[in-house]
Image (cartoon, rainbow, N blue to C red):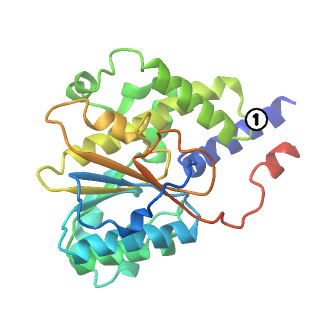
Amino acid sequence: MIFQKAALAAALAAVVMATGCASGGKPVAAPVVAAVADNPQVLLLGEVHDNAEGHKLRYELLRRRVEAGWRPAIVMEQFDRENQDALTQAQKGCLDAQCVIRVVGGPRWDWQLYYPVIQLALTYQLPLVAANLSRADASRVVRDGVRATFDPKSIQDYHLDQPLPADIRSAQQQEIVVGHCNMLPEMMVGGMVDAQVARDIWMAKIVREQRPRDVVLIAGNGHVRKDIGVARWINQTAPTLTVRSIGFIENGDNGGRYDSVQTVAPQQRSDPCKQVKAK
């Protein structure tokens, strides 16, 4: 029994790296892909990681804005932040997105879904910026808390010397528990909440570091949420930036999580909880 619980905990810990970001929403009256003129300083574009239709719609939104003259930096959850030097060199030396993926891409993502965005960045010479925590950094946060990967100034800027806001911790906890089939051992929940929040704060911090250039963030729907995600953290420090969040969602209720949503057909996939529940 002890071995089985340990195995389950290990399996769920691995799953959180790939599944902790998705969130739902509901359609709005006007399709967001039609808007190209109102470019904010920061545009947060979500995803359900494996939904191919959502990736296509998001790419078209971004392509239209870039072809109309917008030149943002593209910050991506899919690249770990300590690989920024390698990503910068790949962007300078590679002729196509497949080369960038070969040089910098890791095993956790279906990179062909991100090929068009990376190619767009190469074609228009838009900086690609790595924003995610590595597995090693995420493990440090799970063990030592949200502050573990931040310098003293960032701890002060984002008030990490104080408890996390109760609404953020509560909502993140709910998302993580439900996202892990309600099978996550209770002792793991707090650390996974800390890791998710640390990712959000790092993305917010890296987005702000691109100023005065405008920024697009490519990340899971959970990260681009206004209420508990990156958008919540971006304006913790001055100056205030204009931020717009768009969720690309399969079903559910927006509930104020995003400024607008684009609803996409659910991706065909096996029940992610079936294998866990069978154990």
Identify which residue is drawn at 53% across, 39% down.
Answer: 255
Percent from the top left, x then y, of residue 203? 34, 45
Percent from the top left, x then y, of residue 52? 56, 71
Left or right, residue 83 beside residue 275: left
Q: Amino acid at mark 1?
A: Met
**In the displayed structure, would residue 108 be above or below residue 189?**
below
User: Would you identify the image quadrant in which residue 158 lies?
Assistant: top left
User: Would you identify the image quadrant in which residue 230 lies?
Assistant: top left
Left or right, residue 218 beside residue 124: right
Identify which residue is drawn at 32% across, 49% down.
Answer: 244
**In the displayed structure, would residue 8 be above or below residue 213?**
above
Q: Residue furthest top?
A: 162
**In the displayed structure, would residue 163 be above or below residue 93?**
above
- In this figure, which residue is indicated by the disc labeled 1? 183
User: Would you identify the image quadrant in which residue 233 lies?
Assistant: top left
Identify which residue is drawn at 35% across, 14% down.
Answer: 162
Q: Residue furthest bottom?
A: 95
Left or right, residue 267 beside residue 205: right
Q: Nearer the viewer, residue 206 or 251?
A: 251
